[in-house]
Structure formats: structure tokens, C-alpha cells
Image (spheres, rainbow, N blue to C red):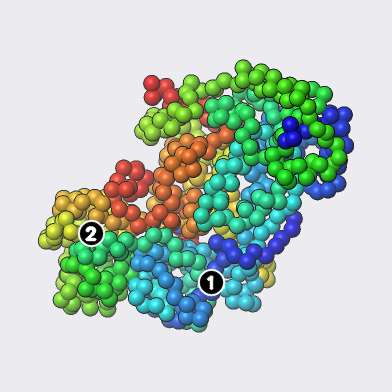
Amino acid sequence: MKKTALLESEFKTKVGKILRTRQMTPLEKLFEIALPGGESLDHLPGQFVMVSLLGVGEAPISVSSSPTKRRSFELVVRKAGRVTTALHRLEAGDEVGIRGPFGNGFPIRYLEGNDLLIVAGGLGIVPIRSIINYTIDNRRDFGKVTILLGCRTPKDLLFSDETDKWNHRLDVMFECTVDRGDAEWDGNVGLITSLIPGITLEPDRTFAIVCGPPIMYKFVIAKLLEKGIPERQIIVSLERHMKCGIGKCGHCQIHNYYCCQDGPVFTYDKIKNLEEAI
Amino acid sequence: MKQYAILQKSHFADFISALAVEQSVMAPVAKGYDNYAFEPVTRASQIALKHIPTILPPKKYFMPPSETILEYSRREGEAVHPVVEYEKMILFGVHTCDLMGVQCLNMALSEHPEDINYLSRKNKIAIIGLECEDYCDEYASCHLMANDLPNGGYDAFFTDLGDYFIIHLNTQMGDDVLGRTKLIEPSTESHWDELMKFREKKRSVFKNEVPVTHQKIKEVFDNAWKSPVWSDIAKRCLACSNCTNVCPTCYCFDVVDEPDLDLITGRRRRKWDSCQSASFARVAGGESFREDRGAKQRHRYYRKFKYPVERFFRYFCTGCGRCSRTCMAKINLKETLTSLVKELN
Ligand SMILES: Cc1cc2nc3c(=O)[nH]c(=O)nc-3n(C[C@H](O)[C@H](O)[C@H](O)COP(=O)(O)OP(=O)(O)OC[C@H]3O[C@@H](n4cnc5c(N)ncnc54)[C@H](O)[C@@H]3O)c2cc1C
Ligand code: SF4
Ligand code: SF4
Ligand code: FES
């Protein structure tokens, strides 16, 4: 067997340097990463990267920061298994491998000039934050912006400093709910679906963006449809097992779509009849 | 007739030896109990000219069960070096079904973004096909899949016509490799006539193995999603993944790191993976979108008969019958198709 070096390969990773980390909850940690020479990742909101640790493996992680922030990007990693646990041991100054960005991202060009209703459940806020911050940084390009956020308990709330800011801005409408409150919590208690009926919106010019745990989609989408939002204006970001990110390994396949390339962002009309999608 | 040549059977032994002097030759070798495997050969006597589909298809040379894609040394931080492992070789004795298997892989793996590891290997393997004159066994459905007659995908193609082989020289590489043996001779009109007679006879032997036309399989799968066939399969399937491991058109893989004992150097490898395994589609929250074995098998069939038609305009089944031959639960592709066809009518 001969072996030769390849100049290029889709599996080649760039070396990312961790600039800063922040433990957000016992399970979630934020990493701010820069590519060599300050090269921009050049991602779209909603895209993801494959993060690699040599000797351990790779995991797909959404880019949580907006592309308007150019010299570095942020990832939020939940400790879920081998790679993610190993990532949690890293601190500023350490290196990680980065491939990507992959996936289609949110269709910003179609969203411009319209109202946005953004619905994030749990860890769904991580990819969604990239589009929220993008929208805020380009606020003039969008109509009314409504953000609904839900999570299990107040302790699970990520980015509370940022959500506070969103809450105080006049140009975004922000509502947050928890499944179970605690002594200090004086906000909404209830599932995220309970926030939707109270929202006023103009369905024809509203695009809804939904990201959260698999169980959430069916219920949230039903409520959005009740509100009269057309199917093709409901945009979901889906999670699948991913190994390659380039439409080859087969893990992320949903019917004829590869979630890593054709997704992870889909409009509801495209996937509503695909039984294994949501 | 320029594209055709002949090789006298009496020269076959010398022919194989001459090829083997030049480079590795892989050909079907009998392993007992009607099992065959592509293995390195140096002599014609090792080759099983009459063979049923080998346990593993020639895919194993194009996309090995396990291959290194990156090498690293942590002395250099997280930097990686992409590599490809390959072997220059001649594959001899590839049946029409397996030729199509390679054609399917070629399509899927050269679709953007290209699979460099596969493609760098592809051009180093010369393929010599060998025609079958009758069914390998009752599991084959090569006529239904339009595969009983050659459809390209080879550098040269042998048809056994008694005392001699007639050879279709399809590429310059085929011409070069065979020419260097100095054993092939120009063909004449009468050799060609013999080949046409042979093919004519074949047309009476190979008939649709399942009561449906090639074209109509599409329609069957447009309507098969909710079929009770899948729940029947769910009860029997053991999820052993044999069916996908032996399939010439399956190319799903897993990526794993293999650190050396020093934990400093190591490599990232990719390995065949199967949509039949429990963890294949499971996401971090523990949810799997195809938990049930019937759904997993349905996915396998849809990846042969529906999804690739939308993507590549062809079925990704060659009719080789390997999945049925190897299944411990005796789940049979021809029977599954037959049941689905019956439901449609
Ligand atoms: C598009 C996309 C974006 C994601 N974004 C984020 C994010 O921003 N933050 C975050 O914390 N997590 C994110 N995830 C989930 C994250 O990829 C998995 O938690 C991680 O891959 C688990 O890897 P592991 O090696 O730590 O776990 P393992 O020890 O391998 O397994 C733990 C669990 O994770 C599942 N899993 C393993 N590998 C993968 C994989 N490659 N893809 C999906 N599931 C897998 C396993 O089936 C198992 O249930 C995202 C996943 C996808 C597909
Ligand atoms: S599905 Fe079965 S018959 Fe078809 S190519 Fe694969 S192994 Fe052969
Ligand atoms: S070979 Fe048979 S038992 Fe094994 S996974 Fe395939 S269909 Fe199931
Ligand atoms: S992650 Fe490999 S095909 Fe999508």
C-alpha cells in the first residue's frame, strides 16, 4: 500500500485559536475562536462548523455569533459526549481544528424587508443568536422583530446579559418563558407555545424562524400555522447526526436531503410531508 | 473491429502471468461453499472464472472498509496532513453488476464537493470486466436493474466464446495494459458475429426477475412508504448490517481518530458505517429519527430505489443479490420488491 500526501482534502481542518472561554452553565461553555492570520470565517447566520480535537474526533457545532463580527467567532458547546467533553477542558490559548462553515444558513436575502418572529427553545438559542445579532446589527433592513425564548428553568437561560439588552431595546420585542420557575423568577412560566397566541403579527409579511429540541417543532409549527403564517415562511433549523458535513457520509440524511448541505435550515413546506424530518 | 481483440484460451495462463509481472492483479478466488472473494493472484489457476458475486464487491478497493484520511502529530498543535492510501492494480473478472456498482460510486463521490480520497484511487485501478452467460443464482435481479448486458464502466471487457475470449477495448488504459502482454490478437468479423449470437442467447435467458418493469420501480417506491411490508421486515431484521456492508453501492461512513500509544501522533480514519446500526442517526439529545428496524430497512430500500433517482437519475441497486444472499433473517430483495409491486396493483 502506497501513501501520498494530498494538498487539499475536504477533511483538512484549519487551526483555530481559542481567544476566550466562558462557562455559561455547568453544561454549556462558550468559546471565542480566531482563525490563523485573523482570517474571517465568512459564515452566514445558521451555518455550522466541524470542530475537531486530534485523537478525539469531530463534532458539528453551530456558529453562535453574527458574521458582522469578523475577526473571531463564537461557539457554545454543551457537554454531551466524547468530543464535547474534551472541548470543555480547553481554555484560552488552546487550539482546535475547524472545518467549514457548512450548511445553507438562514435565507437572509428573503428575510430582508419582512417582519421576523424568532422562536428559540433551549439550546436552540445558540444558532439563533447569530441571526438575532445579525438582525440587530442591520436593524434597518428588517421590519418588526419579535423574539420568543423558552427554556426549562431560569438556570438554563443562556446569554442572559444579551437577552436583557434585547429586552430593553425599543426596536425588538422580546419575551421569555421557563417551564418551571424558581423563587427569583418573576417572568412567564409555561411552554414556549403558550407565548405565541398573544403575539400580534401580520402573517403575510412575517417569517418565523424556529430552532429547539426535536419535540418542540410540531407544537410550535401548529401554533404558527394557526396564526396564519404561510408554510414557506416558516423556517426551521434541524439537528441530525453528522460526520462529514459534505453530503457523503449519509448520517444526516432526511429523505433525499442531506441536512449538512441542503440544511440545516429548511422551510416548512419543503419538509412537511417528510415523515422522518420533524 | 479495431476496438475488439481476442485472446486464445490457450494463452490465458500466460496472459495473467504477464499482467501480474507488471502490477498487482486482483481476481475472484474460490473460498469454498460457493463463496468467492477478490484477492491478489499471480497465476490463472487461482482464478475462478465461473463465480457468483464475491462476498464483498470490488468497492473494497475503491473505498476500503477503513482508510486513513489525515495524519497528525500534536507537536505541531492541531495541524493535520491529508493523505490517501492507494495501490495501483488491475481488477480482473468484474461482472456487469459490479461494474455498475463502481459507476454508482463514481457518481456519488465525484458530486461536488469531490471525495478526493476516492477519486485519487479511482484512476489507479484498471478494470477488466468478464461477462456472465447465465444467472449466478436465484438471488440475482440484474435484468430488472438493466445490468445483465455491459454498459461501460470498464477499461476492457472479456466475453468467453469457447476457445477464445473476445475483448472490448474501451479505454486507452485498457488497450495499453492488454497490449503490453503481447498476447491479444486482432479480431475478425466472424468473432464479432459469434459475440452477437452469444448476446442473442443471453436475451432469452435473462428476464425480469420481479413482475415490474425497470421504469416502473420508481412508481412502486412513490407509493411504498406506508406499506405493511416494512413492519413485516421490522419483525425479522436483526439489524446486523450485513446487507449494507456487502452492497456495492453503499458508501456511508463513520470518522474515527486513532491516536498512537504516545498520544502525540495518530491518524483520522474513515470506516464503512451502516444505516442499520442503532446509533447511525441518533442525535445528541438521544433522539433517533429512524429508531424502528422497519424504518431503517425502508431507508435502505429508498436509498437504492428512490432518493438516487432524484439525485443521479438512476437506481442505486445493481441486482447483484448480495444483500439477500448474506441476510441472516432471509430478508430477500426480490421478495420485498415483489410484495411492494403486488400492493401497487
Ligand atoms: C448542525 C448542528 C449544529 C449543532 N450545534 C451545536 C451547538 O451549537 N452546540 C452544541 O453543544 N451542540 C451542537 N450540536 C450537537 C453536537 O454536534 C453533538 O452534541 C456532538 O456532536 C456530540 O458529540 P460527542 O462526541 O461529544 O458525543 P458522543 O460521545 O459521540 O455522543 C453523544 C451523543 O451525541 C450524538 N452525536 C454524536 N456525534 C454526533 C454528531 N456528529 N452529530 C450529532 N449528534 C451526534 C450521539 O448519537 C449521542 O447521542 C449540533 C449538531 C448539529 C447537527
Ligand atoms: S441492494 Fe442488494 S442487490 Fe442491490 S446492489 Fe445492494 S447488495 Fe446488490
Ligand atoms: S442483513 Fe438482513 S438481518 Fe442484517 S440488517 Fe440487513 S436485512 Fe437486517
Ligand atoms: S454529515 Fe455526512 S452526509 Fe451530512
Query: What chain letter is assigned to the residue under label 1?
Result: A
Residue B203: % across, % down: 62, 20
Q: Residue at x 62, y 29 (%)?
A: B149
Residue B26 visible: no
* Circle 2 residue: A207
How many other residues sit within 10 Å of disc 2, few (<14), some (14-19) or many (≥20)? many
Residues behind callouts 1 and 2 on a single chain: yes
Q: Residue at x 84, y 28 (%)?
A: B9
Horizontal side of B28 relative to B152 (left or right) equals right
* Circle 1 residue: A14
Horizontal side of A258 relative to A163 (left or right) equals right
**Snapshot quadrant of residue B270:** bottom right
In the image, is residue A79 above or below residue A203? Answer: below
Q: Nearer the viewer, residue B237 or B310?
A: B310
How many other residues sit within 10 Å of disc 1, few (<14), some (14-19) or many (≥20)? some
Q: Residue at x 74, y 35 (%)?
A: B2
Q: Please, what is the three-letter code of the amino acid marked with disc 2?
A: Phe
Q: Nearer the viewer, residue A270 or A58?
A: A270
Q: Nearer the viewer, residue A77 or A82?
A: A77
In the image, is residue A29 above or below residue A209? Answer: below
